[in-house]
Amino acid sequence: MKKTVLVIFGIFFGAVHMFAQGPGVLEKDLSGYLFTYFTGNNVENESIHFAVSPDGFNYYALNGNEPVLDSKKISSTGGVRDPHILRGEDGKMFYMVVTDMTSHKGWDSNRAMVLLKSNDLVNWESSVVNIQERFDGHEDLKRVWAPQTVYDKRAGKYMVYFSMKHGNEPDIIYYAYANGDFTNLESEPKQLFFPKNGKSCIDGDIVEKDGIYHLFYKTEGHGNGIKHATTRDLTSGNWVEDDDYKQQTTEAVEGSSIFKLNNTDTYILMYDVYMKGSYQFTSSTDLNSFEIIDDKISMDFHPRHGTVLPVTRTELKRLFGKWGKPSAYPELKGNPILEGYYADPEILYSNKTNKFYLYPTSDGFTGWSGDYFKTFSSENLMDWKDEGTILDLKKDVAWADRNAWAPSAIEKVTNGETKYYYYFTAAQKIGVAVSDNPNGPFLDSGKALIDFKPKGVKGGQEIDPDVFTDPKTGKSYLYWGNGYMAVAELNNDMVSIKKETIKVLTPDATYREGTEVFYRNGIYYFLWSEDDTRSPDYKVRYAMSDSPIGPLTIPEDNIVLEKAPEKGFYGTGHNSVINVPNTDEWHIVYHRFSVPNGINMGDAAGYHREVCMDQFNFKQTGHIIKVNFNDQGQ
């Protein structure tokens, strides 16, 4: 039996952003920011520090603004400066590069950089790369400054770029590719960029936008400002240089870094106003014109030359677990339970793995246009692991390639063999896929299971499947519909229905979609969503029955959950229910508008939803007690 087992300005709601965070992390799933920096020219300050931000504007130091790594253990000089951090293409690995240098030895004293890598942002492995020792022909090398990393898509490698000065020559920005395990440089440094005016350039910072690489760099010794150049091919040598300076101050600046605000079209260019001991933040949507936004920025520390990385809520929790949560940082709520935008959650307990699994709609796509399904696993209903994509319509389904919505899943044991059946909506039809494991991959049956309307039904859509096995008879049933509720008994193969058993069970005029059926203490419960998922008034109601195929009895007060404006919760609906095995403990999983911005999104709130979980309770009569929302979740 299935069931008993932030933004301050400039949000762009028109499309999900697939900004290059690696295929393992979509921008829609990012919740905050990690700022890595150093703090000064004394050797004790030449070290890596971390700070975090919930919105890209307000920053709080981790670890009491003490270093998070010991410079003496990772460097050859005893100090490091200019940290740059990058998320890998797989979305899981992180790469950091720093200047191996202590300034008290002189600005021409260093020849090395440090390469670091981590899979959790907490534990780092490091390697020193001394250019003069690693490569021939650098006998007159004076300094190696401000390394950074970018993924070169053409080469399929991580490019480390940095400035070097040889003898009396000017500083030039070079590049070399890192080796496969990011412990060394595999290629001889080559010139990446040098201004046409023949003057020095340092502190390069590259960001890609719409297939164009944008390089921000500092002119050294002739203005000390931030300039900008672009190219479509990093190693081509073909750069288009802008004439103007991009900093919005007349003071000397260095160490520029640019990052994109999560789920917006706005970029932040920040830089170190080093003679003043301050930082300046500016914003832009075109990477050309920048506006000062210092009045929106707060920091409880004084950084030098750093970079910012967007991170997920899980990654923030990991950072807090290691270095403590800054007291001023907003609480990370237990709800929502998943990172980013997801909706229509189905929950299942697997007797095979003794874990819970969530199967949601991947949300955040304009007009509900997502085309893949993921699953998440948990041992405790609190910590959810992303198990990855389990069914991709464009790759795995021949009969539909769009609108991947509202799945349902069931564990079924037949002749001692455990199988998992996954019913899903695609192109307003219902399909079914099968796997030996709850986390897939699932193999589609090859055709739509439901692509017709039941007899007598005129409107609505063939969406929102729900699967249920009657504990009394062992028979399995499929429910579906939008504007109507239909049911049919499944054949033993679980991938076809007995068409002669199709029955319309629409409870009343409040029924819209999202049927959910479960059994407890002799009662069959039927839950459904009322109104439109774009509506703040989207809610869940229920009916009771003595049979999995009705008739239905509707209680006088039958609202299960609805909006709570005093808490900022709207659009609460499309639920699933789970019973913790061997207990009478129940939980409801549902989606709501994203908090706090969803209520201001208009129709786009209907596809910018987040998944939550709350306790689910019953009266002694068996009637459902209306859900009391809890920010902290379970």
Image (tube, grey):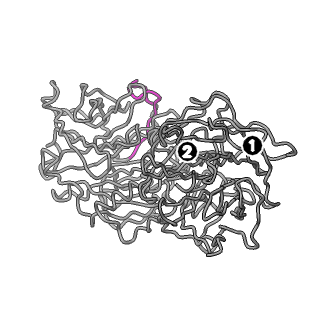
Mark 2: which amino acid?
His
Q: Which corner quadrant of the image does residue 235 belong to? A: top left
Q: Which corner quadrant of the image does residue 37 belong to? A: bottom left
Choose between 487 and 594: the one closer to the eye.
Answer: 487
Is the C-beta separation of discs 1 and 2 under 8 Å? no
Provide the secondary structure element on which disc 2 rests. loop
Viewed as shown, does residue 139 lie left or right of 591? left
Q: What label does residue 70 carry, if any? A: none
Q: Position of residue 163 (x, y in %)?
A: 27, 37
Viewed as shown, does residue 371 lie left or right of 220? right
Return the residue at label 2: 17
Q: Position of residue 164 (x, y in %)?
A: 24, 35
Q: Position of residue 305 (x, y in %)?
A: 31, 52
Viewed as shown, does residue 595 lie left or right of 549? left
Mark 1: which amino acid?
Glu
Q: Taking the image as drawn, is residue 605 in sight?
A: yes
Q: What residue is shown at x 40% (from left), y 37% (from top)?
A: 89
Start-end of magenta stretch = 226-239
Q: How far is disc 1 from disc 2 in space, using C-alphas?
A: 29 Å
Q: Residues within 10 Å of mark 1 (few under 14, many from 20)?
A: many
Q: Residues within 10 Å of mark 2 (few under 14, many from 20)?
A: some
Return the residue at label 1: 462
Q: How many marks?
A: 2
Q: What residue is shown at x 22% (from left), y 39% (from top)?
A: 144
Choose between 36 and 450: the one closer to the eye.
Answer: 450
Choose between 151 and 389: the one closer to the eye.
Answer: 389
